[in-house]
Amino acid sequence: MKWELGKINKVKHCKNPKLYTSDVIHAYKDLDLGLLLNPIIDNILYPILYEVEGDIVVEDFGTAGCFSLTPIKELDYSEPEWYQNIEIREKVQIQFAILCAESITNFWIEICPNDDRLKRRFEASKNYIKTNAIAAYDIVRIVCPYACAYDYRIDFISLAKSAISAVLK
């Protein structure tokens, strides 16, 4: 697919489309969340960011899937100030991971009160992830599948905004 302003990109319509497959074109619902999740999901070093239009046919915690998307505006990396400074970016990434892990850990305790594996894993790594963005992203890689598998609606967009606010205070 070639992305150009005003050019419609399409995939073939199908019944019961699934995210993270070739069934749909993927988009993030929020710029900050997209920049936070890019290293985990897409890992594009210098992504080109667009505001897009399209009808959402499937979605989850912050990702939308569409049969067609049209880029209407190229976005500037300088808009999210937290993303410009690598040191601040890593702190935001770490804070986001901690918030995600705490959220799913609380949920896990509710549904499996006698199984403390996830809680022990998070507690054991909490001090390490406070200083290591790569380890923090390993935690987010764990959290996202748990959230999807149990249809637990973590508001990842709010967690992203909370992480940014906490770091920029």
Image (cartoon, grey):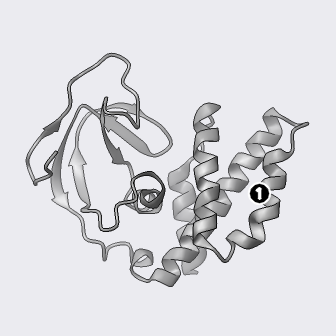
Query: Percent position (x, y) of residue 163?
Result: 58, 67
Q: Is residue 81 left or right of residue 55?
A: right
Q: Does residue 110 sit above or below 88 in this rendering?
A: above
Dot 1: what SS? helix
Query: Image height check: is 59 above or below 121?
Result: above
Q: Residue 157 or 125: which is nearer the viewer?
A: 125
Q: Residues within 10 Å of mark 1 (few under 14, many from 20)?
A: some
Residue 51 vs residue 40, the one in the foreground:
40
On the picture, is 152 further left or further right than 5?
Answer: right
Q: Quadrant of residue 84?
A: bottom left
Is 80 or 34 nearer to us in this picture? 34
Whether 5 is drawn above or below 8: the answer is below
Please indicate whether residue 37 sits to the left or right of residue 56 in the image: right
Outermost residue toward the top in this view: 15
Residue 9 in percent (x, y) is at: 15, 40
Question: At x 63% / y 48%, what residue is drawn?
Answer: 143
Q: Position of residue 82 (x, y in %)?
A: 45, 76
Report the residue marked by disc 1: 122
Residue 56 left/right relative to 132: left
Indicate the position of residue 156 as horizontal and vertical percent values: 54, 51
Quadrant for the C terminus in the image? bottom right
Q: Which residue shows up at 10% across the image and 53% down it?
A: 4
- Name above or below for residue 74 compared with residue 169: above
- Number of marks drawn: 1
Of the 4 image quadrants, the one containing the N terminus is: top left
Task: Tell me the residue at 77%/72% (across/down).
Answer: 127
Q: Please report the residue visible at 62 percent of the width from the left and 64 percent of the height from the top.
A: 136
Q: Amino acid at mark 1?
A: Phe
